[in-house]
Amino acid sequence: MGGNEFKKPLLEKVYYEGCPGCCVDQKKEVQTGLPIKEVFCIWIVTLSVTLPISSLFPFLYFMVRDFNIAEEEEDISYYAGYVGSTYMIGRALTSVFWGVVADRYGRKPVILLGTSSVVIFNTLFGFSVNYWMAIVTRFLLGFLNGLLGTVKAYASELLREEHRALALSSISTAWGIGLVIGPAVGGFLAQPAEKFPSLVSPDSLFGRFPYLLPCLCISTFALFVTIVAIWLPETLHIHKNNELESASNVPDVEEKTVEKKDSTLLSLLKNWPLMSSIIVYCVFSLQNMAYNEIFSLWAVSPRSLGGLSYTTEDVGTVLSITGVGLLVFQTALYPIAERTFGPIMVARISGVMSIPLLSSYPYIAMLSGSMLFFTLNCASIVKNVLSASIITGTFMLQNKAVDQHQRGMANGIAMTLQSAFQAIGPACGGALLSWTQKRQHAAFLPV
């Protein structure tokens, strides 16, 4: 018998008329060259949501001080930690819900809601007149923002398979740069009446609300991104039976049923490759958020409390330099490292190298002048490069561990757990810094 007699024709993809996911799949079939426009859109959407997360850290110490809620100067970091945590608490409560919404109604509505929430609540945070207004606006900003989990699923669906690593790398790059540029924006633009008295009067809007300007700038950027996102294509499949699917076209009804069963929460929780990468990411997220909180609070704290006595502008300068270094590494060096060692080994090496680096910061505080500036910038660049490497590696592992139709819920689970750990980071970081500042000369565990 000839071998050809037993060969079956390959199953052709079925495209449904009026289905936005099918339209995207058809465009991907004929797509050539690097999808620069799509990657850029994913990048700016992620950046717009990442900027508000850490932009408050350089001025949070002074903001809480102006609220007059702390009885002693050493307690300011304690209260500041809770403001930093409320965003993550709000996001932890709703990330799975937004993942389910993205799987059922589409990626695009969740993306638009996320960027719109930044426009509204980040601006209101800049208008905060007391501690509790700051807490509530940050909580609502996180509560209504399920974008970061959804955009990872969206990036995996929008581009061809050979470009998905680039798309996920753009998300981690935007995340890393946002956590650096956000504090830089906050550091440079906070308290403009004190920094630029010839331009900003104490009686003007930005003089009466000294922390509004950085928030407003970020919100304006988010408004621009929201407008751009209106024209983003939807990638969710809506077929003729009015059933929404995030998977590629599956013509067999029985196969669709299997996919539905596999998309349950229980099956994802039993997916050890997925859950192991999420656990690593969560533990690292706790450490990274605690670092971001402590670094800015430590830098602006007075020398008498073990800090550097930096201004918000000094902190902004350090973080701007760090952002440039991070951008160069992610675009030029990380792809080479990932191809050479693989995402798992790169993450492992980065984690190990972070331990001695973080242990060196108390000794950096003993320096002064140009030596302090140079050493601090080098340490900050290396720390954020290592962080971005771990983030990119875990993103790639998470999305490889699940099928396309599971990515919305899978990333929702990841964001929920990650947000819970990130909520602990700033609160514990601020409380720990406050505790250490009070124990500089203690007999037990002195700083």
Image (cartoon, grey):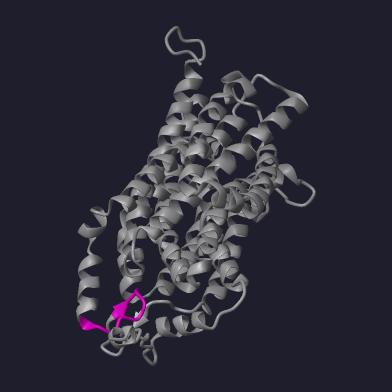
For residue 179: magenta?
no
Quadrant containing the N terminus in the rendered view: bottom left
User: Where does residue 204 sit, x and y in percent of width and height?
Assistant: 68, 54
Q: Residue at x 53, y 71 (%)?
A: 226
Q: Position of residue 310 (x, y in %)?
A: 67, 32
Q: Compare residues 164 and 375 and report the one nearer the observer.
A: 164
Relative to 302, does residue 6 appear above or below in the rendering?
below
- The residue lying at 39 percent from left, 91 percent from top is 18
Q: Is residue 292 left or right of residue 299?
A: left
Q: Is residue 103 above or below residue 54?
A: below
Q: Which contiguous range is marked in magenta?
A: 244-253
Relative depth, front residue between 256 and 120: 256
Q: In the visual, does 94 lie left or right of 385? A: left
Q: Nearer the viewer, residue 402 or 181?
A: 402
Report the side of 91 relative to 218 (left or right). left
- Which residue corresponds to the image point at 44% horizontal and 27% vertical from the top-left? 432
Q: Position of residue 77 (x, y in %)?
A: 49, 32
Q: Position of residue 126 (x, y in %)?
A: 55, 53
